């Protein structure tokens, strides 16, 4: 099912690749809120590891603990061979962290922004490093452009260039393509795969299923708890779902009725069709056949998609902060 999206992953990292992230039982509280609960995670060198989950699920907090910006309350493990509890300063020097929002200086030019970042890292030969970053991401012709005038896609490239200036071994990207156009997203992911091929490890959080399918492995976190992990195929298989596609007129009016059917655990709209999923294949099929009988509707079994699984996991997760 995912083969066409994985043509460039034939040399994916083996179990023999060294672990860049290896943490067990990581926890973080903010007051009474238990934001990350016993997180255990392993990411190998050169791997693109996707982090999925609803807003407020603890993805950003987890990323910040891994890169040394937050100290876990408990747990243990290493990042880049360094202790995540005691060596946060050393970890930060070897990690490139790209935040959700553009965090550089909008009143400086592209070149000035990169030079400032190079100064903060105390880099030698700053000019050569900045020139290399500009060339690597196609920014040479925009060196003198004020950052605040850039489109979302170009700001994204500038942010990535800043992350790469000090030649990090690990990139932590927090929803890096939010708000950019499809071409900019595709170009960005081509760059991510190029970096992975060069041995740089990437941990990226995303809400886009096409991006998730381009990762070597995935983890789904919901309100602080890791619910599923593995390749896209393994995550889909782990939920033991079966999906039927329903097509025909006035489907929008039938969604709530379909949700009441025995065996129907999930009903989701995909364009002009509905996907109905459940774990009891026989019961779901029988219910749907009764439902479509005598109606101008068609039903067909379809492969379970990662998006079906994503919605199913979200549906089964209760927001602990909801009143």
Image: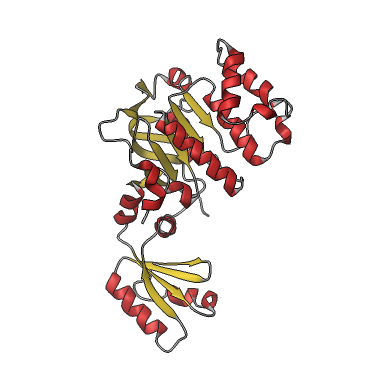
Q: Position of residue 131 (x, y in %)?
A: 60, 20
Q: Nearer the viewer, residue 307 or 75?
A: 307
* Residue 159 quadrant: top right
Give the residue drawn at x 40%, y 55%: 306
* Residue 119 quadrant: top right
Q: Position of residue 296 (x, y in %)?
A: 47, 85
Residue 105 can be seen, yes or no? no
Give the residue drawn at x 33%, y 74%: 284
148 relative position to 174: left or right: right
Query: How many labels, in total?
Result: 0
293 relative position to 252: left or right: left
Give the residue drawn at x 45%, y 21%: 94
Q: Nearer the viewer, residue 314 or 138?
A: 138
- In the image, is residue 80 above or below residue 172? above
320 relative position to 280: left or right: right
310 relative position to 25: left or right: right
Residue 306 can be seen, yes or no? yes
Quadrant (top left, top right, bottom left, bottom right) of the N terminus:
bottom left
- In the image, is residue 77 above or below residue 320? above
Give the residue drawn at x 44%, y 57%: 307
Q: Position of residue 177 (x, y in %)?
A: 56, 42
Q: Residue furthest left?
A: 16
- In the image, is residue 79 above or below residue 192? above
Q: Position of residue 77 (x, y in %)?
A: 33, 27
- In the image, is residue 62 above or below residue 107? below
Q: Nearer the viewer, residue 96 or 198?
A: 198
Looking at the image, what colour scheme do you see? secondary structure
* Residue 312 quadrant: bottom left
Q: Residue furthest top?
A: 124
């Amino acid at each position: 099912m995912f083969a066409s999206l994985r043509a460039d992953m034939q040399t994916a990292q083996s179990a023999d690749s060294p672990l860049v992230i290896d943490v067990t039982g990581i926890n973080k509280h903010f007051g009474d809120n238990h934001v990350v609960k016993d997180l255990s995670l392993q990411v190998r060198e050169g791997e693109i590891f996707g982090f999925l989950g609803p807003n407020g699920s603890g993805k950003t907090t987890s990323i910040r603990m891994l890169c040394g910006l937050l100290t876990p309350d408990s747990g243990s493990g290493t990042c880049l061979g360094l202790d995540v509890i005691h060596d946060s300063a050393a970890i930060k020097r070897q990690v490139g962290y790209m935040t959700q929002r553009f965090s550089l200086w909008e009143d400086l030019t592209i070149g000035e922004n990169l030079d400032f970042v190079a100064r903060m890292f105390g880099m030698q030969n700053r000019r050569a490093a900045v020139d290399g970053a500009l060339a690597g991401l196609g920014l040479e012709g925009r060196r003198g452009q004020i950052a605040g005038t850039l489109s979302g896609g170009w700001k994204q490239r500038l942010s990535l260039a800043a992350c790469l200036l000090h030649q990090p071994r690990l990139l932590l990207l927090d929803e890096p393509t939010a708000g950019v156009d499809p071409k900019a997203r595709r170009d960005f992911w081509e760059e991510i795969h190029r970096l992975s091929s060069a041995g740089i490890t990437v941990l990226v959080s995303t809400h886009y299923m096409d991006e998730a399918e381009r990762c070597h492995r995935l983890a789904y976190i919901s309100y602080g708890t890791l619910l599923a992990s593995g390749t896209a195929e393994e995550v889909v298989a782990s939920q033991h779902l079966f999906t039927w596609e329903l097509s025909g007129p006035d489907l929008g009016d039938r969604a709530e009725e379909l949700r009441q059917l025995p065996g129907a655990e999930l009903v989701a709209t995909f364009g002009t069709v509905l996907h109905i999923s459940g774990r009891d294949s026989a019961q779901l099929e029988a219910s749907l056949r009764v439902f479509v009988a005598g109606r101008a509707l068609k039903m067909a079994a379809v492969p379970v998609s990662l998006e079906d699984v994503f919605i199913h996991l979200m549906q089964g997760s209760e927001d602990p902060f909801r009143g």
